Image: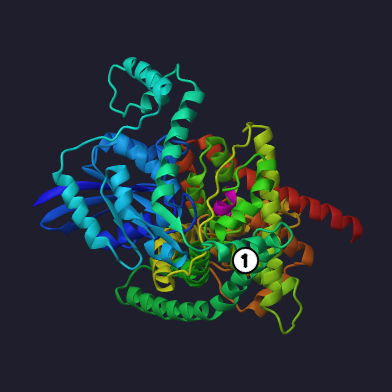
Amino acid sequence: METWSIALAGDPNVGKSTLFNALTGLHQHTGNWAGKTVGMAQGHFTFHMKHFTLTDLPGMYSLYADSAEEAAARDYLYAEKPSLVVVVCDACCLERGLALVLQVAEAVERVVVCVNLMDEAKKRGITVDLAALETMLGLPVVGTSARSGAGLDVLQERICEALTCLPMPHPINYGEDVERQIQSARETQTDMPYPRWTAIRTSAEASEAVRETIQTAAAARAREIAGHVSHETIEADARDRRLDRLLLDRRFGIPLMLLLLGVVLWITMAGANVPSKWLSMLFDTIGGGLHKLLCAIHAPGWLTSLLCDGVYRTLAWVVAVMLPPMAIFFPLFTLLEDAGLLPRAAFLLDERFRKAGACGKQALTMCMGLGCNACGVTGCRIIASPRERLIAVLTNSMMPCNGRFPLLTALLGLFFVTGCAVDAVLPAILLLGIIVLAVGMTLRVSRILSKTVLRGVPSSFVMEMPPYRMPQIGRTLVRSLLDRTIFVLGRACTAAIPAGVLIWCVGNITVGGTSLLTYATQSLDPFARYFGMDGTILLAFLLGFPANEIVIPVMLMGYLTQGTLTEVSTAALGSILLANGWTWRTALCTVLFSVFHFPCATTVQTIHKETGSLRWTALAVVLPTTVGLLLCWIVTSVTRCFM
């Protein structure tokens, strides 16, 4: 069977990944902000006895690469030389997509234009004359609605037809002056695998003005074509504009976004308790069966204890505590993405990030960090500037991830919320306040970095405001569970297994009748007291390096001098902490250090992978830890003056 390679190219947020899913049967998660897709997914489909390999390229606005994603997409087109490129455009904003179509048509030999989101365009009173567009471009044009599957058969037909035609590039006439400079730049290249306009990009003698002229010429031609074929019969953006006047207002926008985030946190905290208890009971039953099995096969006592009380108990704790909140938070977070709210949050915060020498897109990566810092670090790829991307990577761990929520909510509920009818609401409000503090400290540290080791001028960026859309709830729930929850949980479990071995060894190996755990807590205690904590608390954070979820049980293991992780009720936890000298100051310092401390093992690995540098990875560990210790020292010093 004949096989052809097809590449999907297009601006961010035009439904490209949805089209990819519909054609291949794979269900790649689709985000709703510019630059969300940062990798290349591949799939396969068959049509008319032809086999196609389909590659979903990262979103790009231009082949003049301004970001790592655009560079990756451009380099794929040049190096892999796909048989055909399908350029996906948004029917609601045709002009923007046509500028990319013109560039791609000049760069490759076979192009099919897919005008997607035709259903949304119809709802908004926008009509596109596809026949006229095809005539003006000289390229096959197909209208589709990928979410409903409309037009996909026609698209596949036109792909097959285009593959049988002779390859033919479509150069743009940029005008006599620019054409002469393009030719001059091209003559200096001994081996030019790129289209002729790229000679300007690669020529050391080419001026920025010439590049801008080329971009302007393509944009002007795109505007001319769109003006002839796209017509608006009603005020298309009336609803979106009304909502934006409210949500993007400087007085109301940020409070409304904070209220929305507070609701998400409240739902996550209130909804995770019952399933966590169910999972804990289930794992206890399974653990009992595993213990009986090992005893039945006459396994050594130490091995039985290591596997059951060390590895299994740690793994079960991580899953029981981590899974329910993630299964609630990630779908809600994804719904906010798909509805088009998160790009507006970035827009609201852009001015503050620019003052801090950072990029407004960092707000999006920080929101991802609330679910998982490793995901937030990976999401920093959407930031074009290497300097600003590095700032976002180094500071992402200052956002409290989902793994820290159990400790934060437990301490907030025990020490700062007296029994009342709104127990689930007040901790959520306090947690929201902590997140606001984390955002403020992130901005402060970002500014310090931009003025010292990462000096530079903040770059400007174009933030695309996607239309407000009704999220695809069913697909969102399934994909957020598989793409984020299960993926993150799997990495956490991988780190929890060796952590279980280490915790068991520390708690059960004795020297002179005293466990290593006791020696460690006693050694750390003088240092920890200086910051308002004790040695047991500090050791719990150190042993919780593989997964933040095990900090509380390690803490209990130290206080109760046991050799295994221990689970108790919230009331019993409060009694144990009070019996070991905890005060509200101890709780406050522990909360602050929980928010600002070294990232978990998974995040550290991700930072090293993204930066490729041990130096930057070490700085990413030191920065939040330094901030946390400094805040704890300030709280301890100030309160001791008045107590």
Q: Main secondary structure of the magenta part?
A: helix
Q: Between residues 110 and 511, which one lies in front from this camera angle?
A: 110
Classify 65 as above or below 585: above
Give, as a single range, the part of the protein colored magenta: 362-367
Badge 1 amino acid: Leu
Residue 252 drawn at (x, y percent): 71, 63
Left or right: residue 486 versus residue 424 is left
Crowd rating for badge 1 (residues with CA inside 10 Å; few <14, some 14–19, many 20+): some
Residue 63 drawn at (x, y percent): 39, 37
Find out whether residue 434 is within the magenta segment.
no
Residue 360 drawn at (x, y percent): 60, 47
- Residue that numbered label 1 is attached to: 261
Residue 330 in view in this figure: yes
Q: Residue at x 51, y 57 (%)?
A: 466
Q: Residue at x 80, y 51 (%)?
A: 634
Q: Which residue appears farthest toward the bottom when viewing the image?
A: 421
